[in-house]
Image: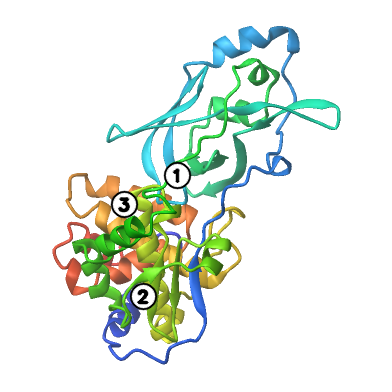
Amino acid sequence: MNRHGSSAAYLVLAASLAACAPFLQETLRASSYAPGAEAYDDTLRVKLAETADETDEAGSAARALGAVVPGYLSARGLPPIEGQFTLTDTGLVFRSVAGVVARFPLVGPVRQSGGRRWRSSSVSLTYIDEASNGSVYVFRLDAGVFETDRPGILLDVASHPVWLDSLAPSEWVVDRPLVSPRDSSALRAATREITTSSYADSLYTLFGSPRAAVGLIGLRGQRSGRLGEYIGRRDSLALDPGRISSEAQLRHTLAHELGHRWQARAPGQLAALWRDVASIRDPHRYGYGIPSEHQAEAIAFAVGFLQTTARGNQLATTSLRLLDHYELLVPGTRTMVRYLALQPIYRNHPLRSDLTTGAR
């Protein structure tokens, strides 16, 4: 399958798979969603070039501040949203097209180790995707990934120029959890609320509802950093709202775990859909090098895309361009979107015809 999908053949395959109602046998393993804690390993923040002149720190900083870079931000492992970054003296400020603002540090505070002083970079160039319509630069920043075809000042920032060290100290941003991890009543209430919501009902329509009541992640899962877990032998699901920082992340986790349920109960169906899907390129993206987790992330991304575009308040070309950016970060998202768009629950989706005619 090429970058934009192909295929009458694909649609015949998807339609036939959609008719496969009987699920196959369950697996006995537990599948969990535990995105990386975004540890800021300096060895991964490769300096592209050391070209800055220490005598011109203030002038270089002044020329850089205020620069704007448009693109798509994927924060905390979630699907990307369109917006732009502005470089300020307090860090990078992202404003989405919907007006949501998020702030990210440019560099960390001054540290001392082994007799030397240093500051961690917050921005690094992960890879460049040579797409058919031009290059897309993928940057990793504090707890997020940013895609852009016009990197501008970010290429300079990724090289950690000397003027960055002249900026005021800043600490890494730590998000607050939705509820206190020590409040068991609040944890259960948050879990009950999301799993009895209309959003959850739409997921159950797609992937079925677990037989067992949804519970909380146990101590072993907490120690492993899991946000969610699906256990096939019990057909059960568990969540940990005490480690989840937003409603969007909680919804994503639920979709990811129910994606594992789909895997466990219809492995042949998923295997047929997954043929020729490329691997995730970003080694820090959850699912990298682990096909089952990659697949569950693609399912969760696909659900997120179909939910985001369900209102039809954007041009179809704009929404389909957004899908390209989902696919760039998590290959296989487009395949899952096209398959899920065939399901009855999405019969009135504004993009259904575009997604299921083989044009994309």
Q: What residue sits 54% from the left and 59% below the top? A: 225
Label 1 sits on residue: 75
User: Which quadrant of the rendered structure holds the C terminus?
Assistant: bottom left
Q: What residue sits 64% from the left and 26% below the top? A: 109
In front of the other: label 3 or label 2?
3
Is the residue 285 above or below the residue 83 in the image? below
Is 327 left, or right, of 198 in this rendering?
right
Q: CA distance from mark 1 to mark 2?
A: 32 Å
Quadrant housing residue 101:
top left
Q: CA distance from mark 1 to mark 3?
A: 20 Å
Is the residue 42 above or below the residue 280 in the image? above
Residue 229, x across and y down, in percent: 45, 70
Whether pointer 1 and pointer 3 mark residues with C-beta atoms closer than 8 Å, the reply is no
Q: Name the kind of residue labelled 3 in the image.
A: Leu
On residue 10, the disc is 2
Residue 328 in sight here: yes
Q: Name the kind of residue labelled 1 in the image.
A: Ala
Foreground pick, 34 / 183: 183
In front of the other: label 1 or label 3?
1
Label 3 sits on residue: 320
> For mark 1, does the 10 Å Cα neighbourhood hold few (<14), some (14 to 19), or many (20 or more) residues?
some
Residue 5 in sight here: no
Circle 1: element type: strand
Q: Earlier in the sequence, mark 1 or mark 2?
A: 2
User: Which quadrant of the rendered structure holds the N terminus?
Assistant: bottom left
In front of the other: label 1 or label 2?
1
> For mark 3, does the 10 Å Cα neighbourhood hold few (<14), some (14 to 19), or many (20 or more) residues?
some
Foreground pick, 305 / 11: 305
